[in-house]
Image: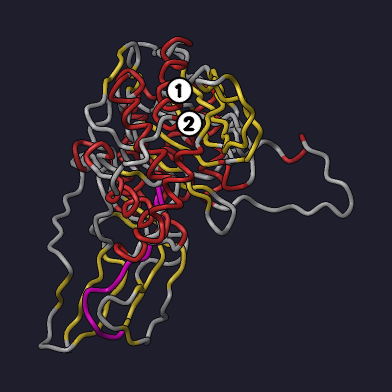
Amino acid sequence: MAEYKLLLPSMGEGVMEATIITWLFNEGDSVKEDDSVVEIATDKVDSDVPTPVSGKIVKILKQKDEVAKVGEAIAILEIEGEGGTTSSEEVKTEAPTSAPDTETLKTIEGALQPTATSHVEFSGDLYLSPLVKSIAQQENISETELKTIKGSGLEGRITKEDILAHVANRGNQPQAAPAQPAVVVAKPVSAPASTVPVAAGDEIIPMDRMRKIIAENMVKAKHIAPHVTSFIETDVTNVVKWRNKHKDIFEKREGEKLTFMPIFVKAIVKAIQDYPMINVSVNGENIIKKKNINIGMATALPDGNLIVPVIKNADQLSLSGLAKAINDLAYRARNKKLRPEDTQGATYTISNVGSFGNLMGTPIIPQPQVAILAIGAIVKKPAVLETKDGDVIAIRQLMFMSHSYDHRVVDGSLGGMFLKHVHDYLQNWDMNTEV
């Protein structure tokens, strides 16, 4: 028999580590190739790790709530074959030149107890994993100081070992000129319990990991971007008729459901092509105009949380391609099958609040995007139509759209004209459109 090291696989650009949520098998259990053996969580998404070989789990190296780095062994399997140790990939590990010894690392990590005082706020220009950010906050390391640390991770990113080595050597370094004081803010999702009275019979429900991330991101988004929201009511009668005509044919031909979402995304893509300055991000005093059009799709999960998978290069997909991409992402989101890269790189986001029966909403812009569109419920209403024989009242399918945009770079004229173009594409939908 031989030993096989199960390594934490690469999970996409920028993802350097993950937290173990739960093991699906115990030590001594036999597993088959492609069995999901452990659930992990990154700051982007929860997912499963399958085993590429069949064998028996003889030792679990990373327990629940422990953090593992990409390429690090998380379990040892016993497999058929001659003696020796193999792994899913060759991993080269080099300790940072300034790293302290193992005992010093353990001492530092043991001393890093969470504090309930204040936290350093980071601008987002510097990539920090959740663990590194937590250590920086606990040690009151400013972003200016972090930028002096030479990272040993991918593309020079700061790893846990790098920041712990910096903490260990902090007192031995020569005193630099006083830096600007760090911006200190109260952590948005962990206010002291005493600030909210708890009455007899009240139930206290701790936020799960994803809810904490959502809360932090929403507060950050509102803090960074001055939000403005424009509204418009759109007659989507042609869209409804066209979908009703094609949905059964499409499902028989493609084995996929034809929802309204690919139609809405198609209209958004066309409007972005008309007004590309909606497809931008802000970096300090610079505006980054995005080449790709990647549409984020806000998706409600069965546990009540929210995730935003991304339709990459949506401008290059047909209606049929959009339908397949949307159905695939929605299915994998609701079944915890998304990969971290599936939630990265969005340049514009759509949220369908109409799926909950809401007429309209005021969506929050996900950073670093500058705009988001909320689609309301489609409702039959009497409406005035202009005809060659005069105005008439008819029953039409109407829908509100709400467009929130970042007033730092998107003024009312641009935000309003963009929304009007989405409206025009939907209201004048060509009944001869092919799918």
Q: Give the image quarter of residue 82.
A: bottom left
417 relative to 322 in the view: left or right: right
Percent across and percent down for residue 303 are: 58, 58
Residue at image point 43% right, 32% down:
426
Percent across and percent down for residue 17 are: 33, 51
94 relative to 235 in the view: left or right: left
Q: Which comes sooner in the sequence, label 1 or label 2?
A: 2
Residue 328 sits above or below residue 100 on the image: below
Q: Nearer the viewer, residue 264 or 245?
A: 245
Residue 124 sits above or below residue 73 on the image: above
Q: Amino acid at mark 1?
A: Leu
User: Are there few (<14), some (14-19), or many (20+) residues within 10 Å of tag 2?
Assistant: many
Residue at the far right: name it: 200
Magenta stretch bounds: 40-56
Instruction: Describe the colour scheme in one phrase.
Output: secondary structure
Camera-near label (1 vs 2) is: 1
Q: Is residue 360 magenta?
A: no
Q: Are marks 1 and 2 in contact (CB under 8 Å)?
A: yes
Q: CA distance from mark 1 to mark 2?
A: 8 Å
User: Are there few (<14), some (14-19), or many (20+) residues within 10 Å of tag 1?
Assistant: many
Percent across and percent down for residue 320 are: 29, 51
Q: Is residue 41 magenta?
A: yes
- Which residue is label 1 attached to? 419
Q: Amino acid at mark 2?
A: Leu
Q: Which labelled disc corresponds to residue 373?
A: 2
Q: How many numbered discs?
A: 2
